[in-house]
Structure formats: structure tokens, C-alpha cells
Image (tube, rainbow, N blue to C red):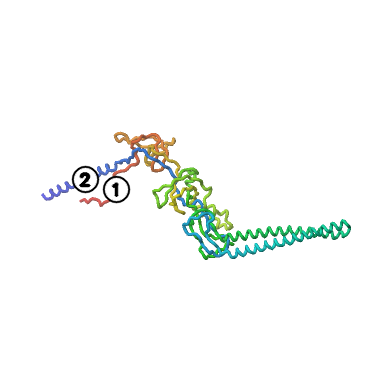
Amino acid sequence: MMSKAKATIVGTIAVALAVGGFLFWQQRAASQTPSVLTSAVARGDVEVTVLATGILKPVRLVAVGAQASGRITGIKVVLGQTVKAGDLVAEIDSMTQENSLRTAEAALANVKAQRIEKEATMVLNRQSLARQQEMVSKNAASRADYESAVADLDVTKAQLSALDAQIEEAQVAVETAKINLGYTRITAPIDGTVLSIVSQEGQTVNASQSAPTIAILGQLDTMTVRTEISEADITKVSPGLPVYFTVLGEPAKRYDAKLESIEPAPESIRSDSSFSSSSSSSSSSSSSSSSSSEAIYYNGIFNVPNVDGRLRTYMTAEVHVVLGSVHDVLTVPAAALGSLRSDGRYTVRVIGTGGAISEETVEIGLNDKMIAEVRSGLSEGERVVTGEVTADDSSSSNASGPPPMGF
């Protein structure tokens, strides 16, 4: 009696397991039936750009240096000050230059005095020559005395010419001394803003070796953006294309401009091994190896007004060079595009009435890899397939639990 009941229980469990297994595999097969992701054909804007990084600099950036050596006796500007061309920036101790000017002026006065003396001598020589000419005509003087008087006059004329040259030389020396004295007063070469003060009051500068920088001025009413465009994108861009950029501090504010020029060579050309004075083959090979492994960028240049002064020197700009843009056109996600045909068109899967999927050939315009412009082949409101997903993908995490227990 007990064995029959036990057999009944075992049979019931076996039937339950069989039914559960059948339902499990039926559900699994149903879950692997693919479903599609769709998107509607809608109107929108498409813009294709080249993304680059730029640095903002003043349209004119000038390092104001010293051409005179000496101790700085005064800095006449402060950081951020706006100056006009000719305004005093700094002064250098001028005692040496003043003494040089006085010496040059004294030398000029000395030469002029010598010329006055020679002019008096020439007057005397002319009078002596006139007397000799009269006496020779009356046979009252020798021919030798007459010739001596002629020679004295010629010598005096030559001496006057030499003194005239010395006077000109002395005048040049005076003008040079005045210029050198002027160098002790350092003035602003342009209208601009004081961006940096490099040297301090009391510091001694030596202009005989290199021109030491006193301050740096920049014209901030217009900023120049130097944009690094990679060699992968440089063939796509050209001067005249519209550009816009944002800065890190104001990512929502857009500045518009036009690309004005592209430098013909990257800045790395300055360190080209062809210009190196070293004859070492190892250093040359090392340089070429290093340059070949570095990314190459070409500078695109454009200016942007900065009337309000919000743009600062050396800010980083996220620059977009616009290759093309369209507005209020039919668009589809780029993921909906199938294979590219030989005629330049794409195959797109379209959801028809009743959920049937058909393939259509469409003409695509601009494509920014996210959204593509539809020129023909689709109508607004149609739904296109952008991908497929199976329920197994979404429930794979649940299937990874512990296996069911059985007998």
C-alpha cells in the first residue's frame, strides 16, 4: 500500500517537471524572437563640423624691451592698465647716456671752432695770393712766392672740407647720444593693456647681450584664435569657412567668425633636423623618430571682436569648423542607414502598415554620424528600423541565477 502511494507521488512530480520544462523552453524560444528599435522620419537640422582646440591671443602682442643698459629707476604702469602709444612705461638710470651726450656735443663744438679758425686762415691766404698776383704782374715778386701763396690757399680749402666732414661726424655722434638717452625712457609702442610686468624697479638690465623685456602689452579689443587642426581633417577645411567656438567658462555662449587663413606648415617645422647644426647621425635619427611619432597639427587663424573684454589671453577654445549645414530638412538617425550602394544611395528598412518591414533606397545628404539628412526616398512620419534587440539580451542577468533544484 505504501509503495503504491510513493509511486503515485513520484509520478506526479515527474509530470510536473515535464510540464515546467516544456513551458521553460517555450518561454525561452519566445524570448529569443527579435524585436526592432524604430525611429520616425522627422524634420530637423544637420551640421557637419571639424572639432579642434584653439588658443586665444590678443590681435597684437608686444614685448616692450630695453635698448639701454642700466638700473631701472621706475616702473610707471601697473597690471591691467590701459596705455596709449607713447605713454611712459619705465625709466632707466640715464647718467651714463647724459654724459655721452655732453661729450658728443663738446666734440661738435670743438670741430666747429676749428672750422671758424680755418675760415679766417683762408681769408688771409686769399689776401696774400691777391698781393702776390699783383706783384708778379709788376715783376716785383718771384714766381715761387706766388706759387706758395696758391698752395697755401688750396691747403686751407682742403682742411675746411675735412673739418666739414668731421662736423657731420660729430653731429651724427650727438644724434646717436640723444637717441641713446631717449632709450632710458621706455614708452609704449602701441595702444594696449599691460598684461605682464617682467622687470621690477631697482633691477639692472643689460641690453648689450639681448633686449630685456620690461612689460608685455596686448590689444584686447580683438582676439586672434590659433586653432590646431589635425592632419586627418586639414584637407577638409579651407579659408572662408564659418567657424564658432565656446570657452570653458561659458560653454553655452557661442562666438561666430570665419576662418581667415591656414598656416602652410605645422609649428614643428621649427625643430626640423634639416636645420640642426649637429652632425650626429644618432641625434638626427632620434629627432626624425620623435617627429614621426608625434601628432601633426596645422594652425588655422581667425579673429573675433572682444569689445566687452570677456575673452582673456590664452583661454582655451573649443572650435567647430563648419563644413556644411542644413536646416528644417527630413532626417533619420545615422544608425538606420544600411549598406552603401554603388550609386551612392543607402538601403533603409521601413516599418509598413501592419508592422511589415520593407527595404527602401534613399538619397542621403549631410551626415554627422548621429543624424543624416534625407534628400529623397522617405516621407515625414515614416518609421525606420535603427536596430534589433531580443528579450534574451534584457533577461540575461536573470538567467544567471542558481539552477532550479530537483529530485
Please indicate whether residue 137 sits to the left or right of residue 65 in the image: right
Is residue 303 positioned above or below 380 on the image?
below
Foreground pick, 342 / 141 = 141
Q: Quadrant of residue 335?
A: top left
Is residue 50 positioned above or below 148 on the image?
above
Is residue 321 positioned above or below 161 on the image?
above
Foreground pick, 386 / 373 = 373
Residue occupying image coordinates x 39% and y 50%: 251
Residue occupying image coordinates x 51% and y 60%: 76
Residue 368's label in the rendered image is none
Do callouts 2 and 1 mark residues in contact (Cβ within 8 Å)?
A: no
How far across and how far down the image is residue 54, in percent? 46, 50
Q: Quadrant of residue 391?
A: top left
Considering every residue shown, the one lying at the far right of the view is 139
Name the residue that disc number 1 marks: 396
Kind of residue at disc 2: Gly
How far across and how far down the image is residue 83, in percent? 50, 55
How far across and how far down the image is residue 327, in percent? 40, 39
Q: Is mark 1 on a helix, strand or loop?
A: loop
Residue occupying image coordinates x 88% and y 59%: 140
Residue 286 appears anywhere in the view: no
Residue occupying image coordinates x 47% and y 57%: 81
Q: What element carries label 2?
A: helix
Please indicate whether residue 221 sits to the left or right of residue 382 in the image: right
Name the residue that disc number 2 marks: 20
Kind of residue at disc 1: Ser
Residue 1 appears anywhere in the view: yes
